[in-house]
Image (cartoon, helix red, strand yellow):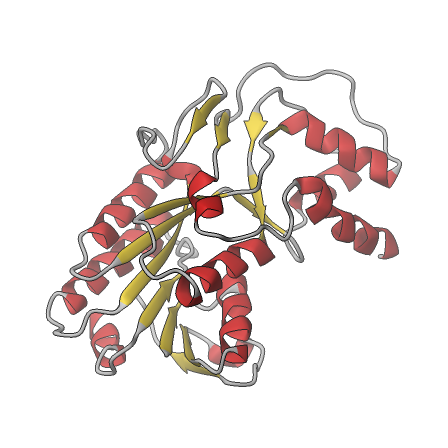
C-alpha cells in the first residue's frame, strides 16, 4: 500500500511511523524536509501544496491513500484561506484529470461548528461557522467532498499532547480565564491511531467523523483538575460568557462504531503523562 502524506507536521509524522511498521510505502510532503525527523521506511520530499504544478508532479505516481493535514499559511492575512482552501482547490483540479482516484482522508476541525448553548452535536449537525477561519475550513471541506474519489473528513476537536501544552503554560504563567463553556479534545496519539485504523482496518470509511474523546467537559473543570495536579492556585471567579470557540458537546459514535478504541478516553488519562513531564522541567 502506497500512502502520500500531504503536509508533514506532528500528526502526519505519527501516522507515518505507524504505517511504516505495517510495511507500507510512506511518502511525506512538506516545504522543508530537512527540518523533519528521519524515520525508517518514510521518504520525505519537498513541495509547495499551494503550487498546482508541483501537485501534478506528485500525482504522476498512483497512490492508494492520501492523508491531508494542512495548517494556516504563516504571515498571510487570509491565512486559513491560503493554508486550507487554496491547496484543496488545486488538489481538486489535479485529481479531476486523473484516471486513478486514491482514497482521501482529510483532517479538518470542529471549528466548522458554531453552536454556543452546550448542544450535543454529531456529524450531521448544522455547520454554520461565523468566524473567518471556520468559514475557510468549511469551504475546504466542500472542495474535498467534491473530489471524484472516496473521501473521509475528520473533524478533530482540540488536539493536545506532547508539545501541545497551551493549558499548562497558561496555568504556569497565571493567565487563566475560567469559562463555564463546554469543551472537547482529543489526544494527538488518538488522532494518528484513528487515521491508521481507517487506512488499515475499515473497508468503507464514512464521509465525515467527529474525532474527540468520550468526555466533553467544562473548560473551568479542566483547569481546576490540572491546577490540582500541579499544586497551583486558581482564581475563584468563573466567566459565564461563552468564549470565542463556542460551547458544544461532541459525540464520537462514528469513531466508536468503526471499532477504534481510544487510548485516552478522557483528558485525565491524556494529561497525566504531560503533567509528570511538566513537573520534571
Q: Position of residue 222 (x, y in %)?
A: 70, 32
Q: Position of residue 97 (x, y in %)?
A: 10, 70
Residue toward you, 22 or 236: 22
Is 158 above or below relative to 47?
above
Tell me the residue at 56%/16% (across/down). 241
Q: Quadrant of residue 60?
A: bottom left
Tell me the residue at 15%/64% (across/down). 93
Tell me if 229 is positioned left or right of 110 in this view: right
Is 268 above or below relative to 195?
above
Residue toward you, 44 or 79: 44
Asked whether the viewer can see residue 173, the reply is no
Tell me the residue at 38%/32% (across/down). 113
Q: Quadrant of residue 89?
A: bottom left
Q: Position of residue 143 (x, y in %)?
A: 22, 51
Q: Position of residue 148 (x, y in %)?
A: 15, 60
Tell me the residue at 47%/34% (across/down). 251
Asked whether the viewer can see residue 11, the reply is yes
Amino acid at each position: 500500500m502506497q500512502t502520500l502524506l500531504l503536509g508533514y507536521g506532528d500528526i502526519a509524522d505519527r501516522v507515518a511511523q505507524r504505517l511504516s511498521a505495517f510495511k507500507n510505502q510512506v511518502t511525506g510532503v512538506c516545504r522543508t524536509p530537512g527540518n523533519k525527523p528521519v524515520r525508517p521506511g518514510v521518504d520525505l520530499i519537498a513541495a509547495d501544496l499551494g503550487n498546482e504544478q508541483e501537485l501534478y508532479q506528485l500525482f504522476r505516481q498512483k497512490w492508494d491513500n492520501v492523508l491531508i493535514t494542512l495548517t494556516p499559511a504563516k504571515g498571510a492575512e487570509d491565512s486559513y484561506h491560503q493554508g486550507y482552501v487554496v491547496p484543496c482547490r488545486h488538489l481538486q483540479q489535479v485529481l479531476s484529470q486523473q484516471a486513478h482516484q486514491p482514497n482521501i482522508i482529510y483532517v479538518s476541525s470542529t471549528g466548522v461548528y458554531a453552536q454556543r448553548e452546550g448542544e450535543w452535536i454529531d456529524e450531521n449537525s448544522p455547520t454554520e461557522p461565523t468566524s473567518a477561519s471556520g468559514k475557510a475550513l468549511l469551504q475546504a471541506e466542500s472542495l474535498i467532498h467534491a473530489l471524484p474519489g472516496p473521501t473521509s473528513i475528520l473533524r478533530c476537536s482540540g488536539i493536545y499532547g506532547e508539545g501541545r501544552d497551551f493549558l499548562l503554560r497558561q496555568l504556569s504563567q497565571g493567565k487563566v480565564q475560567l469559562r463555564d463553556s463546554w469543551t472537547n479534545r482529543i489526544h494527538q496519539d488518538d488522532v494518528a491511531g484513528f487515521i491508521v485504523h481507517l487506512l488499515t482496518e475499515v473497508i468503507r470509511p464514512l464521509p465525515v467523523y467527529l474525532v474527540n474523546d468520550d468526555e466533553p467537559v467544562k473548560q473551568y473543570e479542566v483547569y481546576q483538575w490540572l491546577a490540582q495536579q500541579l499544586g497551583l492556585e486558581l482564581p475563584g471567579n468563573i466567566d459565564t460568557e461563552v468564549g470565542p470557540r463556542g460551547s458544544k458537546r461532541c459525540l464520537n459514535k462514528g469513531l466508536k462504531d468503526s471499532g477504534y478504541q481510544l487510548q485516552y478516553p478522557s483528558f485525565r488519562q491524556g494529561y497525566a503523562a504531560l503533567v509528570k513531564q511538566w513537573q520534571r522541567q
